[in-house]
Amino acid sequence: MDRSDGPHLVYFADPMCSWCWGFSPVIQAIGERFGEDLPIRLVLGGLRPGTVEPMDEQARAEMRGHWNHVHEASGQPFDWGFFEREGFVYDTEPASRAVVLMRRRGTAEALAGLRRLQRAFYAEGRDITELDQLAALAAELGFEQGAFRAALDEPATLRETRADFSLAAQSGVRGFPTLIAGTGGARDYALLTHGFQPAQRVLPALQRWLDGLGGRAA
């Protein structure tokens, strides 16, 4: 884990992780509650990068079950038309590359980009494995579409994305969302949640953690 100064969070997520979509309002609530007192660093975890085989009926059935659970737990909307597609290849690497590019402008831009891609995929039925679709979504956020599309294919973008995947693996993260709190020391990290938790649980836990550090109450 890279060293950061002061209290901060490290958020391991994937744009095509349904539980991360469910957790998206919680991440927004953390930003609204704590702001600059508790910056959030986003690491792309790599849910299913490099997948090449289309989803079969069993995979679609399992995924529909996950989506139902996420919807029930979080209230987040879903476009169920996804399950009428044939031959969909669930490769999460292209969308992760897009968020990595957005992150170069800053953490806030990365989190906003992650939310936009999540909503596009889960609630709007858009295919965020397609690079042209990713570039169009980036354009909505103020990126130049042609330059963004070209950068998605650059070797440096792929290396940066895979470095995120490696960091997640080296940190022992095995599922998403995972949220870790740190104080600036290389070993001073505490697991806040591995998996979905609602805001009413996460926010008080974070406040107690900050209070224990002598941090300012939000």
Image (cartoon, rainbow, N blue to C red):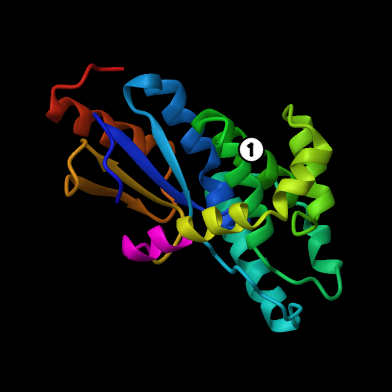
Secondary structure under the numbered disc 1 in the rendered image = helix
Q: Residue at x 21, y 36 (%)?
A: 184
- Which residues make up the magenta segment? 165-173
In the shown orientation, is residue 186 left or right of residue 34? left
Instruction: Please determine whether, in this image, residue 64 is positioned above or below residue 215.
Output: below
55 or 12: nearer the eye?
12
Q: Position of residue 205 (x, y in %)?
A: 27, 37
Q: Which residue is mark 1?
A: 113
136 or 80: nearer the eye?
136
Instruction: Please determine whether, in this image, residue 174 is positioned above or below residue 136.
Output: below
Instruction: Please determine whether, in this image, residue 124 is positioned above or below residue 130.
Output: above
Q: Residue at x 75, y 82 (%)?
A: 57
Q: Quadrant of the C terminus?
A: top left
Q: Residue furthest front?
A: 155
Q: Position of residue 190 (x, y in %)?
A: 22, 47
In the shown orientation, is residue 47 left or right of residue 10? right
Q: Position of residue 204 (x, y in %)?
A: 29, 32
Q: Main secondary structure of the magenta part?
A: helix
Q: Is residue 182 visible?
A: yes
7 or 73: nearer the eye?
7
Q: Residue at x 40, y 66 (%)?
A: 174
- Amino acid bearing label 1: Gly
Asked if the stretch drawn in magenta spans residue 26, the answer is no
In the shown orientation, is residue 179 left or right of residue 146? left
Asked if the stretch drawn in magenta spans residue 167, the answer is yes
In the shown orientation, is residue 28 left or right of residue 125? left
Q: Residue at x 62, y 43 (%)?
A: 101
Instruction: Please determine whether, in this image, residue 52 is positioned above or below residue 22.
Output: below
Q: Is residue 126 visible?
A: no
